[in-house]
Image (cartoon, grey):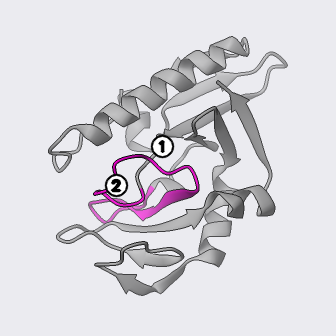
């Protein structure tokens, strides 16, 4: 179950997260993977699911829903991804969580990337010394929401596609 943040006043982020996790679960089952939800303690460590593939590989996954680029946008954006260096409390973000892989939900598939490879890529791409509190699109710069201790940035999906290994799980 996705974590309900007290600052998610509309519940929109919670619903998007729940829908993405449900979709990922059903998609993985189509591939005949054995899949099970993480424990509550594991969710805090940024693990949503455990998977065992048909050839016996085991790994953990943190699922990320499609997101808007800006809160005021009417629809999600499949060209950019939000990445989290620090969470809302200032602790390590999901880039530094315990999941083996991150699964980014997209319109027709899930983009699966090794979390450590993604973290290294983001550390190279993002200038964390440039803090933008009011940036319209904080591409490759640090962004912190007012009154929070998070540290986020936007990267392009193509940054992943052209720079690190990935897999696609078609919905």
Labelled disc at residue 66: 1
Looking at the image, which is closer to me, 123 or 72? 72
Q: Quadrant of the N terminus?
A: top left
Residue occupying the point 49% across, 37% down: 47
Residue 119 in percent (x, y) is at 61, 63
Q: Give the range drawn in magenta.
A: 69-93
Residue occupying the point 56% across, 49% down: 78
* Secondary structure under the numbered disc 1 in the rendered image: loop
Say if residue 96 shows up in the picture: no
Residue occupying the point 63% across, 52% down: 115
Say if residue 66 shows up in the picture: yes
Label 2 with label 1: CB-CB less than 8 Å: no
Residue occupying the point 47% across, 21% down: 22
Residue lying farthest to the right in this orientation: 55
Q: How crowded is mark 1: few (under 14 residues within 10 Å), some or many (20 or more)?
A: many
Residue 103 placement, left or right of 132:
right
Looking at the image, which is closer to me, 108 or 17? 108
| Badge count | 2
Residue 79 in percent (x, y) is at 58, 56
* Secondary structure under the numbered disc 2 in the rendered image: loop
Q: In this view, does 66 lie above or below 79?
A: above
Residue lying farthest to the front in this orientation: 74
Task: Determine if the magenta segment contains residue 146.
Answer: no
Instruction: Nearest to the eye among marks 2 and 1: give it.
Output: 2
Q: Distance between the residues labelled 2 and 1?
A: 13 Å
Looking at the image, which is closer to me, 49 or 146? 146
- Labels 2 and 1: the sequence-earlier one: 1
Labelled disc at residue 58: none
Q: In which quarter of the image is the C terminus?
A: top right
Task: Determine if the magenta segment contains residue 70.
Answer: yes
> To which residue does mark 2 refer?
73
């Amino acid at each position: 179950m996705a974590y309900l943040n007290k600052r998610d006043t509309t519940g929109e982020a919670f619903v998007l997260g729940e829908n993405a996790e449900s979709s990922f679960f059903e998609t993985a089952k189509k591939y005949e993977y054995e899949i099970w939800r993480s424990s509550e303690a594991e969710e805090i460590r940024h693990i949503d699911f455990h998977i065992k593939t048909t050839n016996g590989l085991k790994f953990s996954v943190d699922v990320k829903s499609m997101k808007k680029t800006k809160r005021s946008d009417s629809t999600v954006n499949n060209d950019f991804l939000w990445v989290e260096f620090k969470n809302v409390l200032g602790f390590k973000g999901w880039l530094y969580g315990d999941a083996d892989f991150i699964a980014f939900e997209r319109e027709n598939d899930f983009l699966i990337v090794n979390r450590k490879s993604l973290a290294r890529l983001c550390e190279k791409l993002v200038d964390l010394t440039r803090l933008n509190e009011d940036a319209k699109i904080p591409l490759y710069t640090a962004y912190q929401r007012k009154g929070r201790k998070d540290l986020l940035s936007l990267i392009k999906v193509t940054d992943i596609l052209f720079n690190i290994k990935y897999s696609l799980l078609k919905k």
